[in-house]
Image (tube, rainbow, N blue to C red):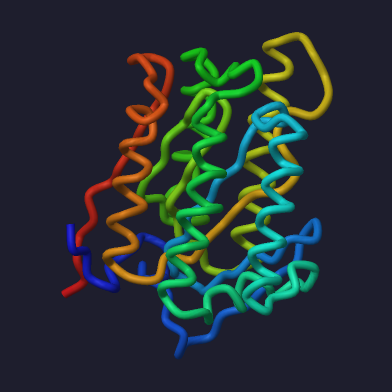
Amino acid sequence: MGQPRKSESNIPNLALQTFDPNEQYAAVVRHRLPHWSQPGTITFITWRTWDSMPAPVVEDWLVRRDAWLRHHGINPLLSNWRSRLDSLPEAARTEFKRLLSDRWNDHLDALHGQCVLSRPEFTRMIADSLIHFDGDRYVLTDYVVMPNHVHVLAAFSSEEGMLQQCESWKHFTARQINQALCRKGQFWQQDDFDHLVRSSDDFDRYRLYIGDNPIRARLNAGQFLHYSKPLTPKS
């Protein structure tokens, strides 16, 4: 798609962009995980249902991740491990993605758990919540609602704004879905995964990944909902 690095948004003074290391950015540690943010920078965000990953799968993945990081001189217990990872040579970052990030996404696409989000009424409920404040609190470009997880591409005006909005999305949809299922308790996993998009090519890859997610998981029509917004380049 070759999107330009910046394009217009509807939020005052917020221009969509990919990550610029020369501009101000910040990290906020929430639930022991670092979340990196830069105003206007498109962010790839994933959150998942509480039963989407069996405990042994998570434990094995964490052991493999921590061993890989230590092998490359990074302490996985430090809050800045992700920024240290980003500073590694491209070959090492590619290896991490192939051995760990892609493996994690493969586990998600195995569709563990009850997968209640495959029900069209719940899929639409989440989609409506994502669209509701688009252009007001954030700029949304893409999403896919899968049976047990959600991927989003969006930009926010601040790091706290991103975290607060993710909490709002999850709290609202969990309450609505639990009420519809006549049950209480945890619905989403507490932590989210987020990644600052670093280039127009990176952005294109994430858009393609989101669009192809239902195909990789071999879903039928009606078991997911995908959205992608055309972007207008900034002149």
Q: Quadrant of the C terminus?
A: bottom left
Question: In the rendered image, is residue 99 in sight?
Answer: yes
Whether residue 116 is situated above or below residue 110 in the rendered picture: above
Q: Quadrant of the N terminus?
A: bottom left
The image quadrant that residue 171 belongs to is top right
Residue 8: where, in percent of width, then height?
29, 66
The image quadrant that residue 11 belongs to is bottom left
Residue 131: where, in percent of width, then height?
44, 39
Whether residue 217 is situated above or below residue 228 in the rendered picture: above
Q: Nearer the viewer, residue 81 or 228?
A: 81
Residue drawn at x 72%, y 44% as measured from the top left = 60
Query: Relative to 154, is 65 on the left or the right?
Result: right
Q: Nearer the viewer, residue 37 or 175?
A: 37
Residue drawn at x 36%, y 67% as measured from the top left = 16
Residue farthest right in this picture: 185
Residue drawn at x 18%, y 63% as measured from the top left = 2
